[in-house]
Amino acid sequence: MDSIFADAQKRLVEVFRHIDLTDDVREKLKHPKLSLCVSIPVRMDNGHLRVFTGYRVQFDDTRGPTKGGIRYHPDVSLDEVTSLSFWMTIKCAVMNLPFGGAKGGVSVNPKDLSRLELERLSRSYIRAIADIIGPQRDIPAPDVYTNATVMGWMADEYYQIKRQQLPGVITGKPIHLNGSLGRDSATGRGALHVLQQWVERHDLHAEKMTLAVQGFGNAGYHFSRLAHEAGFKVVAISDSRGAIFSEEGLDPQKVMDHKEQKKDLRTMLYCDGSVCDLQRYKKLSGRELLELDVDVLVLAALENQVDKDNAGNIKARQLLEIANGPVTSEADVLLAKRGITVLPDVLVNAGGVTVSYFEWVQNRAGFYWDENKVNSRLKETMVREARTIFDLAEEKHISLRTAAYLQGVKRIAGAITQQGTHEYFQNT
Ligand code: GLU
């Protein structure tokens, strides 16, 4: 199997067929600008020192300081972080945010660490990468298994190193530490705006549509909650341990309340407490959830969930990519042949980085917006870029993914070309 980055790059081949680009642009999009691999020493609660491996990759900064989250996961690798930094570059351009793309990660299972160990790890990681980040250079944010609390520790560590309060260095911070209202739910909310635009455009009706959601982290939870409020029927939800299904529909908020209490979705199968009194659930494996006959399969977990081996079993009519890279390039082709529409990650999950941008703007201005303003500006941005991409796909008869990439690459190419000297070297 290809590396994740090699697979991510394959998508560009199709994009390049539809756009006239200089060699400079093609060449630049193949290589990350900076890849840093660091050792992160952490004093564990038992007194022993453990050294973790972390990464920060800045892919391209032609359009502005690089932007992208930090992931804590046992499978984090340089290949994965590089791919994620590439997707961030495309995503920021798709949304027309004045940022390039980056990503960071630490290879660790955060569930194995105590809270204090997690804090020491987060501070140690920032000490290791402090020289290459900054409000005008590279701005981290949350990603898989990191959250506002982690961002708060990281920002504080950075201020101590620089001996200055520089809140624009990290986004997704806690509200009381100069975070933005609405950032927490932004990825899920943005994804719902894209789905609603799609539904409206195709004369579909939310009340008649069923959704299965893979992944119940920050994005999957907020999306499910808001989709349920908007009238969609969420019939299945999974987390890393298993899935639950109910033909009548689930109430995602109740599922979350239960998960918070029991830390496991599967315990919902047993009738303990009020939840089971109200609803009946069927237990499924994570894989079975992917193959449910629903209108929309929502992929909100990790990359490579739908590949050439299971693409043929997908029964959903639409796939909504809230995770980064959940469908491989081979699966893209197989799904398209079967008439299944993929609403692509670089658009669908861009609400997170869009509100990160708003947070950075507020931090720099020192002037804070109320939640309505954040949410209405998010909606405006998501709707505008979604419509542009839907129009482009229809006009050129290309997939939504190719249309989104086309839109992003066009903006990046404009920046690279206007910065470069290519034309002076032609015909010499
Ligand atoms: N980690 C999120 C993403 O993949 C958010 C990045 C950010 O806010 O900078 O889009």
Image (cartoon, grey):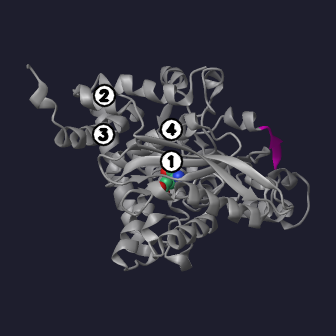
| Residue at the spot 54% in from the left edge and 49% down from the top edge | 104
Mark sitting on residue 129: none
What residue range appears in magenta?
281-285
Q: Are marks 2 and 1 in contact (CB under 8 Å)?
A: no
Secondary structure under the numbered disc 4 in the rendered image: helix
Q: Does residue 368 appear to the left or right of 259 in the view shown? A: left
Per the image, the residue denoted by label 4 is: 82
Secondary structure under the numbered disc 1 in the rendered image: strand
Q: Nearer the viewer, residue 255 or 150?
A: 150
Mark sitting on residue 103: 1
Q: Tell me the quarter of the picture where residue 222 sits.
A: bottom right
Per the image, the residue denoted by label 2 is: 26
Q: Are marks 2 and 3 in contact (CB under 8 Å)?
A: no
Counting labels gives 4
The amino acid type found where label 2 is placed reads Arg
| Mark 2 surroundings: few (<14), some (14-19) or many (≥20) residues within 10 A | some
What is the C-alpha distance between the residues marked 3 and 1?
21 Å
What is the C-alpha distance between the residues marked 2 and 1?
21 Å
